[in-house]
Image (tube, helix red, strand yellow):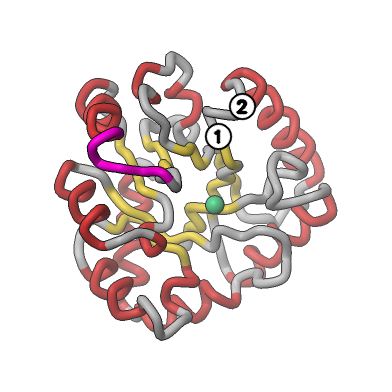
Amino acid sequence: MQIDFHSHILPAADHGSDSLETSLAQVALAGEFGIDLMIATPHFYPRYDAVNTFLDRRAECSRVLMQALPEQSPRILIGAEVQLCRNLDRMEELKELCVRGTEVLLLELPANFSLRSHEQTMEGLLFGRKLKVVLAHIDRYDTSTIDFLLDMGCYAQLNASAFCHFRGRSRALQWAAGDRVVALGSDIHGTRVGYKELAQAKKRLGKDYDRIMSRTQQLLGL
Ligand SMILES: [Fe+2]
């Protein structure tokens, strides 16, 4: 089973897709590549957006997409890419931001991330709320920060693009060979790149690609 864990495919939910037409083209590209399941992960920025406004927008955008999906399309599960902010662990609606039907939260680190100011919130998410926190595209951050968070108990997602450039590729392959990387993502925005990067990542990863896909399945309880 091939799972795209990180995708911006809900029409007008964020800058990933400007229209239903774009969203349908994105899903079609995923289907052609052989994706069975996509997690739709629109951006949620708690500092700029009220959670209820986000949830209403996401519900409407997903309704529009689901109604128009051709029969043979990959299955779509609703989630979110939630940007970390201080005290996020105290947000009542947190469960609704997890991948639907799970306690799996895709968490994006903010530009101003520091262990000192966010450690307490991370502890709250992991041990207070007992969520399975998956750090989005760990390939974008410095190694020591990520390794610290993985040691705390976070899981990790890598973007396909991490395997496509010489810079950072060996680090991504090393992470992928370990057991904390539980998901891969196209992080698709628009239709320009599509699934070309994921195809390259699949080639580079070899058996690790299938191992990561099995871990995603396990994580989601599928
Ligand atoms: Fe993203």
The CB of the residue at mark 1 lies under 8 Å from ligand 1: no
**Amino acid type indicated by mark 2:** Asp
- Residue 203 vertical position relative to residue 116 in the rendered view, above or below: below
- Residue at image point 61% right, 60% down: 188
Q: Are marks 2 and 1 in contact (CB under 8 Å)?
A: yes
Q: Which residue is drawn at 51% across and 42% down?
A: 81
SS type, badge 2: loop
| Label ID, residue 49 | 2
* The N terminus lies in quadrant: bottom left
Q: Which of 201 and 50 is in front in this view?
A: 50
Residue extent of the magenta highlight: 112-117
Residue 158 image point, x, y percent: 40, 62
Q: Mark 1 points at which residue?
A: 45
Crowding at mark 2 (Cα within 10 Å: few <14, some 14-19, many 20+): few
Residue 108 shows up from this direction: no
Q: Residue 29 carries which label?
A: none
Query: Looking at the picture, which amino acid does disc 1 mark?
Result: Tyr
